[in-house]
Image (cartoon, helix red, strand yellow):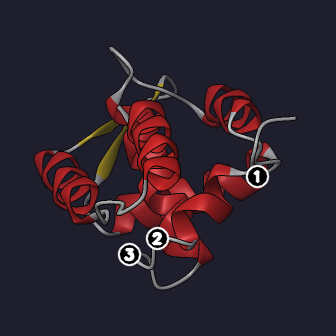
Amino acid sequence: MPIDEKKRLLQTGVFKNESDTILFLLVKLINSKNGPVGSWTLKEDFEKLGILYGTATIGRYLKMLDSKGFTIQKSNQGRILTEGGSNGCQSLKTALPVPKSRASLLRHLKLINTLT
């Protein structure tokens, strides 16, 4: 099973809590798609990152992103990012700390690669 990306991101110190980390990952995943994305697809993407959440839990996080103005729902097709969601994601991505050792550099590059 892959390393839990949520735990790895939490260790960076950029995110205050697990919820903020999950919201960031959702925005990154939605941003990586070419069209609207739903909770089932996001659940499968999370599983690839080692995060095991059900579709209902992901749906609740998506509603949080809607209320923050980061996503909008496209009928029953799923959600897309708003301009605010895209900008917020980019600013958090650049806030990730730069590693100091070779080993942490490799982990950091792998992390950034999974987020883009």
Q: Toward the viewer: 4 or 57?
A: 4
**SS class, disc 3:** loop
Marks 1 and 3 close (CB-CB < 8 Å):
no
Label 1 amino acid? Ala
Residue at the image point whose x is 73% and y is 57% from the top: 57
**Farthest-out residue, top:** 34
Label 3 amino acid? Val
Determine if residue 74 is in view: no
User: Residue 14 bears which disc, if any?
Assistant: 3
**SS class, disc 2:** loop
Residue 16 position, x and y percent, is 47, 85
Q: Toward the viewer: 48 or 23?
A: 48
Q: Earlier in the sequence, mark 2 or mark 1?
A: 2
Marks 2 and 3 close (CB-CB < 8 Å):
yes
Q: Toward the viewer: 108 or 8?
A: 108
The residue that disc 1 covers is: 56
**SS class, disc 1:** helix
The residue that disc 2 covers is: 12
Label 2 amino acid? Thr
Residue at the image point whose x is 38% and y is 40% from the top: 112
Determine if residue 15 is in view: yes
